Image (cartoon, coloured by chain):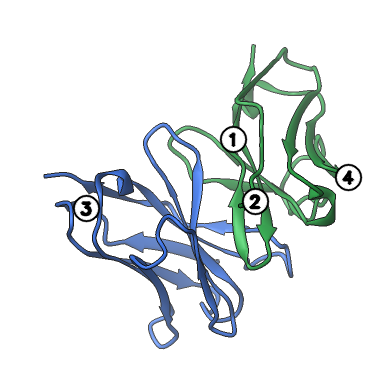
Chain colours: A green, B blue
Amino acid sequence: SYELTQPPSLSVSPGQTAIVTCSSDKLGNRYTSWYQQKPGQSPVLVIYKDNKRPSGIPERFSGSNSGNTATLTISGTQPLDEADYYCQSWDISNVIFGGGTRLTVL
Amino acid sequence: EVQLLETGGGLIQPGGSLRLSCAASGFTVSSNYMSWVRQAPGKGLEWLAIIYSGGSSYYADSVNGRFTISRDSSRNTLYLQMNNLRADDTAVYYCAANVVVVAANGFDLWGQGTLVSVSS
């Protein structure tokens, strides 16, 4: 079955760039979305169709997808960006989530 | 304002059944695809089922044959019928939809979640 692989954790200092990866075979051929989830809250869509930001999502969030890897980049990471991040793609008509990456900003 | 509100969670014994509801407001449930996603305590997001605007539905292997997704346009509500529940079905259950962004290929609207606990 199709799987999306994310690193379990990532730590950055405030102001640095955080790069969260999501890998799978030929992922670049499929659209990928990214979600942010803070403790006790529902997920929030931060990137869709690989690199598009929904209204209200800060410009410091960006995405790319090529080859076998999709990437979520947070430029100038702020303490409020500390959260779990999940990638999501499609396997024909089914939805797949990555295992999630816990981003710590310290 | 578009909104999703899940109800129906609770404590259920192993082998039991439960039906979750997801009431939509500000849009119609048949207008685009909608899904159920769950999150076990301390774990990641797990997709369970999807229903498309045309009515086709698909399931994750983990729940195929036990769970059924459906919708009632007259009540503007999405449902998840869960049968033969097991302890590892314990999770917060979310409904999610693509509502705001046209053809987002993702889920831009999520409910607040409802907790299902399976225990004797």
Structural distance between the alpha carbons of marks 2 and 1: 16 Å
In this picture, is A26 found above or below A100?
A: below
Q: Secondary structure at mark 4?
A: strand
Residue picked out by circle 3: B10
In this picture, is A41 found above or below B77?
A: above
Picture coordinates of residue B14 (x, y %)?
A: 17, 52
Q: Nearer the viewer, mark 3 or mark 1?
A: 1
Protein chain holding label 4: A
Residue picked out by circle 4: A66
Protein chain holding label 2: A
- Find residue B66 and name its label: none
Do discs 1 and 4 share a chain?
yes
Q: Nearer the viewer, mark 2 or mark 1?
A: 2
Residue picked out by circle 2: A2
Q: Secondary structure at mark 2?
A: loop
Picture coordinates of residue A100 (x, y %)?
A: 59, 35
Structural distance between the alpha carbons of marks 2 and 3: 32 Å
Residue picked out by circle 1: A100
Farthest-out residue, left: B120
Q: Which of pointers 1 and 4 lies earlier in the amino acid sequence?
A: 4
Residue B21 makes an appearance in the image = no
**Mark 2 is on which residue type?**
Tyr
Quarter of the picture containing the C terminus of chain A is: top right
Q: At 74% across and 69% down in the image, what residue appears? A: B103
Structural distance between the alpha carbons of marks 2 and 4: 17 Å
Do discs 4 and 3 share a chain?
no
Residue B86 makes an appearance in the image = yes
